Image: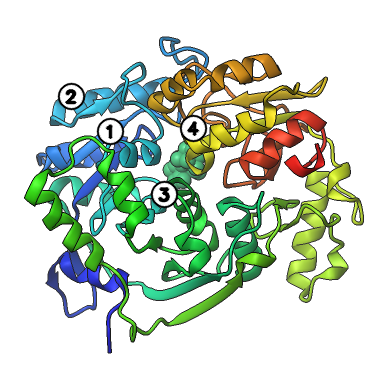
Amino acid sequence: MGSTLAEKVWNEHVVRRTVSGEDLLYVDLHLLHEVNTPQAFQGLRAAGRSVRRPGLTLGTEDHNIPTVSVDKIIQDPVARRQSELMRKNCADFGIPLYRMGDPRQGIVHVISPELGLTRPGMTIVCCDSHTTTQGAFGALAFGIGTSQVEHVLATQTLPMRRPRDMAVTVTGTLPAGVGAKDLVLALIARIGTAGGQGHIVEYRGTAVEALSMEARMTLCNMTVEAGSRAGMVAPDATTLRYLAERPGMPQGEAWEEAVRYWTSLRSDADAVFDKEVVIDGSALSPYVSWGTNPAQSVPLDEAVPSPDDFATERERAAARRALEYMALTPGTPLRDVGVDVVFVGSCTNGRIEDLRAVAEVLDGRQVAEGVELMIVPGSASVRRQAVEEGLADVFARAGADFRAAAGCSMCAALNEDRLLPGQRAASTNNRNFEGRQGAGSRTHIVSPAVAAATAVVGRLAAPADL
Ligand SMILES: CC(C)[C@H](C(=O)O)[C@@H](O)C(=O)O
Ligand code: SF4
């Protein structure tokens, strides 16, 4: 029996197998941000330990920081304290940190691929659930908790039981105007928020092969919203093209050797998956979430569902509660739902291709009266590129607010960018639970193209509607 891609990467990193069934894995790259890390460093200090491999560890500031300017002081005392601790901890333990204002700073899952740190076949961990993003390169990348962060800091290893293997095969070709965000919302709507639990998902099939690296990142990013441990895509020519443009890549014979290894990282034809889901990519259309978890999503062409549409009492109760929170009436066409704010950004959709998609829709158009469109770059580099390519001018002409500094911003409202109670947003982020974008906030998860069209119309809309 052959091996899956995940199994191959896993086996390459096993330092020791234990009788309890857990493997001790070597970690190639450990990423940190200012949330969830202070206790881990406290633990290290208490035990009198140092960081085992500071050179394989990297910190960035992303969650708490203001986005209006790179030198604004954090107002919230708790957030400010977290950032101060992050700076002190990284300095004390010799860990490089990309602070606000650093040209390499940005959302952790955006900068690591962009800086060429994320490579096929690596094990990558971070104190953040959306680390799955980086599986787009055929790396095994996943989020870990604070005590695990401490373990990795101290030992550069992590004990873990190998998750099961799941294949998501997307056949056909995605229609024009349909992207990775729509695909992943459709997948989660189908398998549910626990549909991938205990599994590493490998995405494959013609529609996945056709996706750009950034689109694959969007796909792997939201894989965690189906409860999956990680998402992966086998490295191919698209991956190599992306990597070849990154800084610090091996050169000459070393590059050739790396390419040989990277391209060997694919599931064998006779590999067996514990679970498989097949999606017809050609049948998809733009998706939008109507409820308070990403599985509560439907095609934009449809109407707000009724609790009676669901099979189980549990789902019906969840739908009733979500509809009440979202202030939506069953049967309302989704295109009739008006929004107050449109947020473009996050590690799901804050990369340059996302901003290009938004600019394409906004070019020569205006943001609707009474609607606020906030665009936050995923990294300082994305912002620079958006300025160079003239996207920033398009945003300004359209009346959008293109933020000066990169960060998570309104994705999780851990800085000062947040919705007011009762406000409704179309948002390119990944989570829509109650209060995600501020107390009482209402979130509709959408793609960048739908976000831009919605900003122009003032109601949920696709570019084809303009
Ligand atoms: C703050 C952080 C731990 C959290 C995560 O793990 O995902 C955040 O990034 C999020 O998206 O909710
Ligand atoms: S952008 Fe959002 S999802 Fe991504 S790491 Fe930040 S808060 Fe989490």
Q: Which residue is mark 3?
A: 213
**Foreground tag (3 vs 1):** 3
**Local SS, label 3:** helix
Q: Which residue is mark 1?
A: 59
Q: 10 Å neighbourhood of mark 4: few (<14), some, or many (≥20)?
A: many
Tell which circle, 1 or 4, labels the residue nearer the N-terminal end.
1
Q: Quadrant of residue 33?
A: top left
Q: 10 Å neighbourhood of mark 1: few (<14), some, or many (≥20)?
A: many
**Local SS, label 1:** strand
Confirm or deny contact between disc 4 and disc 2 (CB under 8 A): no
Which residue is at 75% across, 61% downward? 318
Q: Which amino acid lies under the numbered mark 3 shown in the image of this protein?
A: Met
Q: Which amino acid lies under the numbered mark 1 shown in the image of this protein?
A: Gly
> Which of the pair 273/395 is nearer the observer?
395
Tell which circle, 4 or 3, labels the residue nearer the N-terminal end.
3
Confirm or deny contact between disc 1 and disc 4 (CB under 8 A): no
Tell which circle, 1 or 2, labels the residue nearer the N-terminal end.
1
Residue 91 — which label? Answer: 2
